[in-house]
């Protein structure tokens, strides 16, 4: 009985092993495209725990083991654009090829007034022209506001300008000079002048770039003074604004306000 039992065990083991090998070969056949078919052997089979690792047409390795794209040629491994050719990684303009180039643009026309009256500027004068050859800082022309006695008087020169979208800085520069016959030791100023930005419609104030009065008189030196002011760009970039130069005199003593070589430059993306 013992021999019979051992014989049955040996036969069963052989049958089990054969079934296992056939099952593994069927799987290999599926991997190679043969659904439910066994791959043709070529004496290169290596069986480990019932799995065949080399079973392909003669002189070829099984693709499932050595040449499956999933192992080393799958685009997901090294050809996928997401890995090294995606613009988001190294060709996105936002990273290093952004087309934005910062430039400075002069926004004023005839800022030095040397093209004469009516070029770029509009004049609102109490009497006489405001862009004249009277005492310019440089060149031939300058702006002369005020200088009245006997009447309350207001003068103004202005021009409307389009501020580029994306402007990051808006800088006013130029020169001014004040002469007065007012008593400079008085407590309050009587004559004033300013350069400011306003909205063209209704002249709603935006920001003042320069404020002057008769206390700023240069009577002793008659020398122009340089001015510089940076306007806030929030709410201004991409809109049209008005740059205006104004003066106001009372009816007694005069004050002369001279302006020349004005510039309004916008720093923006080109």
Image (spheres, grey):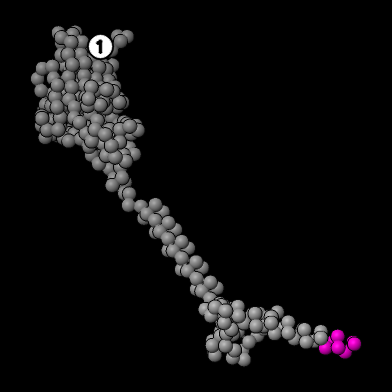
Q: Quadrant of the N terminus?
A: bottom right
Residue at x-position 19% and y-position 24%? 258
Residue at x-position 31% and y-position 45%? 269
Report the residue that reaches farthest toward the right: 1
Disc 1 crowd, CA 10 A, few/some/many (<14, 14-19, 20+): many
Image quadrant of residue 181?
A: top left
- Where does label 1 land, which residue? 190
Image quadrant of residue 254?
A: top left
Question: In the visual, does 202 lie left or right of 64?
Answer: left
Question: Is disc 1 placed on a helix, strand or loop?
Answer: loop
Q: In the rendered image, is residue 218 in sight?
A: no
Q: Which residues are magenta?
A: 1-7
5 drawn magenta? yes
Residue 137 location in percent, x, y? Answer: 18, 30
Q: Secondary structure of the magenta portion, mostly? A: helix
Residue 177 location in percent, x, y? Answer: 22, 24
């Amino acid at each position: 009985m013992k021999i019979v039992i051992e014989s049955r065990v040996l036969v069963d083991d052989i049958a089990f092993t054969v079934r296992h090998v056939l099952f593994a070969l069927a799987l290999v056949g599926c991997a190679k495209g043969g659904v439910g078919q066994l791959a043709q052997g070529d004496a290169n089979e290596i069986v480990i725990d019932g799995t065949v690792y080399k079973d392909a047409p003669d002189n070829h390795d099984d693709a499932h083991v050595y040449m499956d794209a999933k192992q080393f040629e799958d685009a997901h491994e090294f050809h996928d654009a997401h890995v090294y050719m995606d613009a988001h990684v190294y060709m996105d303009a936002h990273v290093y090829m952004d087309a934005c180039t910062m430039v400075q643009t002069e926004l004023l026309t005839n800022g030095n007034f040397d093209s004469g009256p009516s070029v770029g500027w509009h004049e609102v004068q109490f009497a006489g022209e405001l862009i004249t050859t009277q005492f310019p800082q440089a060149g031939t022309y300058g702006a002369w506001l005020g200088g009245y006695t006997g009447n309350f008087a207001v003068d103004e020169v202005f021009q409307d300008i389009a501020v580029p979208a994306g402007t990051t800085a808006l800088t006013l520069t130029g020169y001014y000079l004040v002469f007065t016959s007012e008593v400079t030791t008085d407590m309050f100023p009587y004559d004033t002048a300013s350069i400011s930005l306003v909205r063209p419609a209704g002249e709603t104030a935006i920001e003042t770039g320069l404020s002057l009065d008769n206390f700023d008189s240069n009577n002793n030196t008659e020398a122009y003074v340089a001015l510089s002011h940076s306007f806030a760009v929030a709410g201004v970039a991409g809109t049209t604004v008005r740059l205006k130069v104004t003066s106001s005199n009372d009816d007694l003593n005069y004050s002369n306000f001279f302006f020349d070589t004005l510039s309004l430059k916008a720093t923006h993306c080109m």
